[in-house]
Image (cartoon, rainbow, N blue to C red):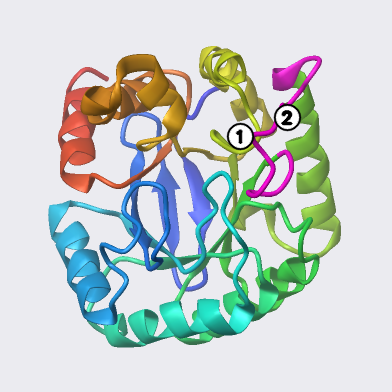
Amino acid sequence: MGLLLGMLWRLKNRTLLCEEQRPLLMGILNVTPDSFSDGGTYFSCEKAVDRALRMEEEGADLIDIGGESTRPNAQEVSAAEELNRVIPVFEALRGKMKIPLSIDTTKSLVAREAIAAGAEVINDVSAFEWDPELLTVARETQAGYVLMHAQGRPRTMQVNPQYEDIVQEIYDFLKNKLEIVERAGVSLESVVIDVGFGFGKTMEHHLTLLKHLRRFTELNRPVLLGVSRKSFLRQLVGAEFVESATTATHLLGSRQGVSLWRTHDIATAFAARKVLGACS
């Protein structure tokens, strides 16, 4: 079953409607010096705030703010450093934006402080495997939660990733995690799932997942697609065409039930969504 009638995603302070014919646009804002695509571009608080406000004007439905790079080979940073990067941005944006903000983190301390500073969503690429206390934070704050699959940690995840049946294995992983989330007292209405493009997958794995995204809608939670400027698209079409490949992949995903696009380029995604809606 797809999301033809839409599916609700409950955040801390509001509820969003996720539809494959009108996917939500999650803008990426990396407050880091070393992210793979835009590291250093928005590292200052002032530049990050300006970028967030611009993405809202361009049509973003929410913005995902991260203070630690999770690109392949990235080194971990301390919670203190992560907080120093992101909290001033959340505080500066408080009261200035109509759309919700998300904190992209794998640390419960960072998630809790970001929510106190205005975040309504926790985007956790580790599926709480690196810090189980993230579930406690999600339950106590009633924040939205993005549950993503990753094989390994950023420093080593692209070193010979292997699966026997990647679609079934990730499906089972996410299904099991959703059961744990529910047992922990977190409402499933607050959860969105993400198969984790770029996190422990080869080119063949990525293409297989793209062909079978519809399968993950059977978990009855909205599916987020995070492929923006990912290296497998660069390898497939060349760096100069990666934005076009991102757009094509977004549209392909929504034809298979995806209802959220996480992207660097909100303006282009907004235009692509208009075409998708006109043809639905």
- Can residue 59 be seen from the camera position used here? yes
Span highlighted in magenta in the image: 151-167
Q: Residues within 10 Å of mark 1 (few under 14, many from 20)?
A: many
Q: Nearer the viewer, residue 35 or 254?
A: 35
Dot 2 and dot 1 residues touching (CB under 8 Å): yes
Give left or right: position of 118 versus 179. Answer: left
Q: In x, y percent, where is residue 156? A: 69, 43
Q: From the image, which quarter does the N terminus lie in?
A: top right
Q: Nearer the viewer, residue 78 or 172?
A: 78
Q: Which residue is mark 2?
A: 170
Q: Residues within 10 Å of mark 2 (few under 14, many from 20)?
A: many
Q: Which residue is mark 1?
A: 195
Q: From the image, which quarter does the C terminus lie in?
A: top left
Determine if the magenta segment contains residue 206. no
| 1 over 47 or under it: above or below | above
Determine if the magenta segment contains residue 157. yes
Q: Residue at x 35, y 36 (%)?
A: 229
Q: Residue at x 66, y 26 (%)?
A: 218
Q: In x, y percent, where is residue 86? A: 43, 77
Picture quarter containing residue 105?
Answer: bottom right
- Which SS class for mark 2? helix
Q: Amino acid at mark 2?
A: Ile
> Which label sits on residue 117?
none
